[in-house]
Image (tube, rainbow, N blue to C red):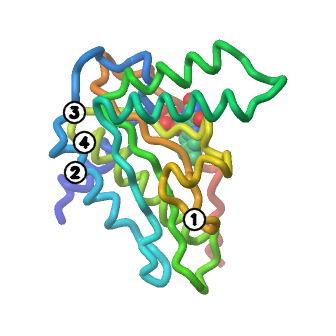
Amino acid sequence: MSQQSAETLNDIIQYRRSVKTGLFKPNESIPDEVIQQALINATWAPNHGKTEPWYFIVYTGEGIKKLCDFQAELYKSESGDKFNEAKYQKLKEDYQKASHVIAICMKREGFSKIPEIEDMCAVACAVQNLALSLHAYGYGGYWTTGGITYYASAKSFFDLGEQDRLMGFYLCGVPLSMPAASQRKPLADKVNWVTG
Ligand SMILES: Cc1cc2nc3c(=O)[nH]c(=O)nc-3n(C[C@H](O)[C@H](O)[C@H](O)COP(=O)(O)O)c2cc1C
């Protein structure tokens, strides 16, 4: 690997931004081949015990509509007195602005000795590979944990068992523009070097 590859990687990492649905170009799609490559890269994430705990479901076209109808109706049936019409409509419509929606899942092996948190960390590493890959190809998206992410009653729709988890959705799209530069706290606030 060269100095040039390292600098390219620095740029990809530091210029990636979460691109939300309002910034997706309407009616423009990411090629399926790019999504496929980003998912291949996702599966090269580190994982303890070779559990490869990630499981992704890619929704596109009518598939996104089916997902939206499911999540809106599940929200309606579970929200009781807290039902909010605007939230219902958002669940029904917002993801349809995306080119692809990827359900981010963690599947646990039957009697895995690996602590659950480590499988969740591995899935998060995979999602970062996915995000960086999309950015490298000039596309965007973001991870959302809103909506029905934490509803136990949602699991069967995603073919998940009791021990498995839905960890949110990666909404992918063609950016109209990149969001304004983001900020990070100074490195010194977050890193302590011990040298002696
Ligand atoms: C696990 C996880 C869950 C997230 N959930 C949401 C969410 O529900 N809604 C949202 O708007 N952004 C969500 N985000 C995206 C963050 O808002 C975003 O990463 C943060 O604002 C930093 O911006 P950047 O990604 O452009 O650096 C999530 C990010 C992570 C890692």
Q: Is residue 83 left or right of residue 109?
A: right
- Closer to the observer: label 4 or label 3? 3
C-beta proximity under 8 Å, tags 1 and 2 = no
Q: Position of residue 156 (x, y in %)?
A: 55, 54
Task: Kindly identify the amino acid type of the residue bearing the numbered disc 3.
Answer: Ile
C-beta proximity under 8 Å, tags 4 and 2 = no
Quadrant of residue 112 within the rendered picture: bottom right
Q: Residue beneath label 2, please? A: 36
Residue 153 to residue 176: above or below? below
Q: Is residue 179 left or right of residue 188?
A: left
> Do we see residue 5 in this rendering?
yes
Task: Kindly identify the amino acid type of the residue bearing the numbered disc 1.
Answer: Gly
As rendered, which of 62 and 30 lies closer to the eye? 62
Q: Position of residue 155 (x, y in %)?
A: 58, 53
Residue 54 to residue 166: above or below? below
Q: Earlier in the sequence, mark 1 or mark 2?
A: 2
Q: Position of residue 163 (x, y in %)?
A: 62, 68
Task: Kindly identify the amino acid type of the residue bearing the numbered disc 4.
Answer: Ala
Distance between mark 4 and mark 3 Cα atoms? 13 Å
Task: Kindly identify the amino acid type of the residue bearing the numbered disc 2.
Answer: Gln
Q: Earlier in the sequence, mark 4 or mark 3?
A: 3
Where is the C terminus found, in terms of image quarters?
A: bottom right
Label 2 near ligand 1 (CB < 8 Å): no
